Amino acid sequence: MSDTILANATLVLPGEVLRGSLRLSGGCIAAIDTGGQVPAGALDCDGDLVMPGLVELHTDNLERHLEPRPGVRWPRTNAIMAHDAELCSAGITTVFDALRIGSIASKSDVIHGEYARAVADEILALRRQGALRISHFLHLRAEICSETLMVELSRFGPRDGIGILSLMDHTPGQRQFRDLRQLERYYRDENGVDRALLERQIAERREVSTRYATLNERAAVDAARRLGAVLASHDDTTAGHVAVSALNGARFAEFPTTIEAARACRDRGIRVMSGAPNLIRGGSHSGNVAAKDLALGGFLDILSSDYVPSSLLSGALDLADLWGSLPRAVATVTAHPADAAGLADRGRIGPGARADLIRVTRIRDAGTVRGVWVSGQRVG
C-alpha cells in the first residue's frame, strides 16, 4: 500500500499551528515536514486546516436513527450505518456509542429495556465485518433510577469491550432537572406530556429511586470494574455529588450542571465535559450552567456533540475564538477525550500516532469537512 502525503496544509499540532505536510504510512503518521511545498503525488490541501480526527465520548445520535419519530423503530443495521456515515461527515473518527441501560418496567418506551444488548451486538458485528467507516466503541449509560438496571448490566461482559460506563440519575428534582419547571417544559415541549401525566411520572420515578438508586449505583460502579470500562459521572450538581464521583473512581464528568460542581471536579482531577450545542446556542436547554461560562472560568476540558454531531467541530472553532488558541480548543475534541477514554494512540498529530485526520475549511463561524482519514485510509 503506497504512502499518502497531505501537503501545503495548516497543521494543528499540540501547542502550535504551522504550514507543512504529513506523510501517512502503515496506518500511522510517519513524518511531519514544514513548508508549503507540494511533492509529486501529494494531495494539495490549499492551506486548509488538517487536525486530528474528532473523538466523541457521548452522543445520543444513534438513538435518533433508531427511533426517527416517536414510536417508530428503524432497522438496527440501517440506523447504525446512517449514524456512522453522519459522524464521518462531521469529522468524527472515533465514537463511543451511548446505549442507555436501566428502565422502569411499567414504562412503555420504544427505546428501553433490552434494546442496548441487541444494538451492541449489531455494532460489534458490523465492526468485525469492517462495514463501518470510523472507529466505534461502546458506552453504557447506566440509569440508577431504574427497576431493571442490574438485570441489564448482567447482559454484558469483558469480551464486549465496553469503553465507558456513565452513572446517570434522572430522578425528578435533582441534577439536570432539579428545577421541576424545567422538567415540565422539557417533557411538554419534547414529548407532548400533559401536567397530570407528568405528575404521575414524577411520583413513579421518585418511588423507583427510593427503592433502587443506592443499590444500582454500587452495582454500576462494580460493573465498570468488571467490564474494564472507564467510569464517568453525569450531571453532577454539587460538590457533594463530585465527592461521591471521585470516591467511585470517575475519570471524567459529563455535563456538570453548575460552576460549583465543575470547580470541585477540577480540584479532584476529574476532567469536565460540556456540550457543544450548549456552547453554540449560548446556554443550556435545561437551564443549567452555560458551557461558555465553564470555558471562561477555565473549567472546560472536553466537548461533546451530545445530540448534534456537526456541533463538535463548530464548537471547537468557537472555543478557538474565545480562548485565542486553536491548539487548545482542538484538544478538547481530540487529545483530551482520547486520554480520558484511555486511547493513547490517537487525538494528536505526531510521528507514530494513528493517522486519524480531517481536513477542514473554515467558513465564518463554522467549518466544513473536506476530507476524512481513518488509519491512513480516506473514508470521507
Image (tube, rainbow, N blue to C red):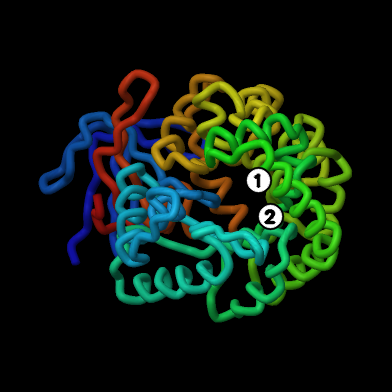
For the residue pair 269 and 117, the one nearer the viewer reads as 117
- How packed mark 1 is, by other alpha carbons closer than 10 Å (few <14, some 14-19, many 20 or more), is many
In the rendering, which numbered label is found on residue 254? 1
The secondary structure type at the circle numbered 2 is: strand
For the residue pair 202 and 87, the one nearer the viewer reads as 202
Task: Say whether residue 256 is left or right of residue 141.
Answer: right
Sequence-wise first label, 1 or 2:
2
Query: Relative to residue 44, is residue 337 depicted above or below?
Result: below
Give residue 35's position: percent from left, percent from top: 28, 33
In the rendering, which numbered label is found on residue 221? none
For the residue pair 84 and 110, the one nearer the viewer reads as 110
What whole-number distance in Å separates the C-alpha atoms at marks 1 and 2? Answer: 7 Å
Residue that mark 2 sits on:
232
At horizontal 55% and vertical 58% (from top left) the residue drawn is: 109
Give residue 205's position: percent from left, percent from top: 75, 53
The secondary structure type at the circle numbered 1 is: strand
Q: Is residue 230 visible?
A: no
CB atoms at circles 1 and 2 under 8 Å apart?
A: yes
Kind of residue at disc 1: Glu
Give residue 373's position: percent from left, percent from top: 30, 52
Give residue 306's position: percent from left, percent from top: 52, 43
At horizontal 37% and vertical 49% (from top left) the residue drawn is: 87
Total numbered circles: 2
At horizontal 49% and vertical 36% (from top left) the residue drawn is: 330
Query: Relative to residue 176, is residue 379 depicted above or below?
Result: below
